Every structure is written in structure tokens, then in C-alpha cells.
Image (cartoon, rainbow, N blue to C red):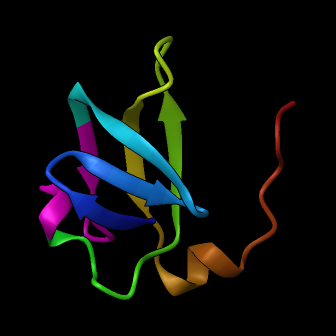
Amino acid sequence: VQHVRETMLSINGNQVLLAPNGTIRSTQNLIIMPTALPPEGAIAEFQLDANGQVQRMWLLTPEEASRQWPRTP
């Protein structure tokens, strides 16, 4: 995930808005602003709301990113 501008994020090359009440959590579990995302991008898990906007996002630590996570369809 990367910050594009204001509340616009780029996830795997697709631009998505952060929902008005959406949150981004850092690897330390702190709420951060989109502008605080690393400029080179970060690996994250996220949930979208009914409008297709990012409701919740968690930046993953290198250890978490290397795990095999079960995926739901």
C-alpha cells in the first residue's frame, strides 16, 4: 500500500479511498494518518466497507508478512 494524495491510497496499483471513519494501524498498532505510510510502500491487510473504501488497515511486520495466512473467498 502507498499514499497517493489526501485520503487516496494505492493498493496493488489500484487507487482506493480511505473511508471517512477508516483507520490505518502501524506495525506498533498505533493509528496513523495516510501521509505517515512509508514512501516506498508497505505490506498490509485491509477490510473494505460496502462502498469499496478502506475501513480498516493494518501494516504488517516483516515476520507477519512472511507467514502463510488463510484466505477467505
63 and 15: which one is in front? Answer: 15
Q: Quadrant of the N terminus?
A: bottom left
54 vs 69: above or below:
above
Q: Which residues are magenta?
A: 23-35
Residue 35 left/right relative to 47 = left
Q: Kindly give the residue lying farthest to the top in the view shown.
A: 50
Q: Quadrant of the C terminus?
A: top right
Quadrant of res 30 = bottom left
Residue 53 left/right relative to 13 = left
Coordinates of residue 7 in the picture (x, y in percent): 20, 45
Residue occupying the point 24% across, 40% down: 23
Residue 46 left/right relative to 54 = right
72 vs 63: above or below:
above
Q: Is residue 72 visible?
A: yes
Coordinates of residue 48 in the picture (x, y in percent): 50, 29
Coordinates of residue 4 in the picture (x, y in percent): 29, 63
Residue occupying the point 44% across, 76% down: 42
16 and 55: which one is in front? Answer: 16
Coordinates of residue 68 in the picture (x, y in percent): 81, 67
Magenta-colored stretch includes residue 30: yes
Q: Is residue 29 visible?
A: no
60 and 33: which one is in front? Answer: 33
Residue occupying the point 77% across, 58% down: 69
5 and 33: which one is in front? Answer: 5
Q: Number of callouts in the render?
A: 0
Magenta-colored stretch includes residue 61: no
